[in-house]
Amino acid sequence: MIDSSALSRAMIVGTALQVMLAVLAFFSGWIAQHALLFGAMMLSAIAGYLYAQDVSKGYLAGAAGGLVAGGVSGLFGVAMSVVLGNTDPGLFVQNTLIFVLTGAIGGVFGQMAADMNAGQIRR
């Protein structure tokens, strides 16, 4: 059901972006305080979006793959953020679950974009 090559590409992109955001937040207090969680949520959603748009096997498959891609990339991002001191370690599980959810939502929107590109949804 989940395409492993597309999943690995989405996870690599998402993880790289999550780690870069955590490092950026380490050097910028404003980003750490005001934009870190929202930015990390968007990056997890982007990982899910990329997976679903690449695979285009339906909304459930897109959401499932996006869930994994967003969750794994978010896991590494929040781990890096905890190690750097940007995030409280007590929020590790909560933030990871948030990234799982936003990855799944990104997967739904990625499938919608794939359908639009295929001409199945009129703009």
Image: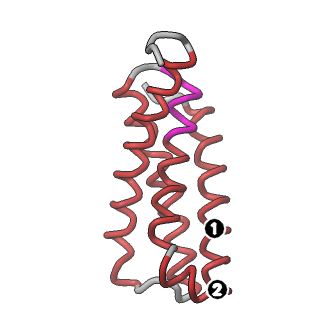
- The mark that comes first in sequence, 1 or 2, is 1
Q: Which mark is residue 28?
A: 2
**Nearest to the observer: residue 28 or residue 78:** 28
Which region shows up in magenta? Answer: 49-56
In the rendered image, which quarter is residue 27 located in? bottom right
Q: Is residue 14 left or right of residue 74?
A: right
Residue 115 location, x and y as percent?
Answer: 48, 18
Q: Is residue 99 left or right of residue 114?
A: left
Q: Secondary structure at mark 2?
A: loop
Q: Is residue 47 left or right of residue 17?
A: left
Q: Is residue 18 magenta?
A: no
Label 1 and label 2: CA atoms lie apart by 14 Å
The three-letter amino acid code for the residue at tag 2 is: Ser
Residue 53 location, x and y as percent?
Answer: 55, 29
**Nearest to the observer: residue 108 or residue 11:** 108
Residue 24 location, x and y as percent?
Answer: 67, 77
Q: Secondary structure at mark 1?
A: helix
The three-letter amino acid code for the residue at tag 1 is: Val
Q: Is residue 51 magenta?
A: yes
Q: Which mark is residue 19?
A: 1
Residue 29 location, x and y as percent?
Answer: 58, 89
**Nearest to the observer: residue 69 or residue 109:** 109
Which residue occupies 38% across, 43% down? 104
Is the residue 105 above or below the residue 42 in the image?
A: above
Which residue occupies 62% across, 32% down? 5
In the rendered image, which quarter is residue 65 located in? top left
Q: Is residue 67 left or right of residue 46?
A: left
Which residue occupies 52% across, 23% down? 114
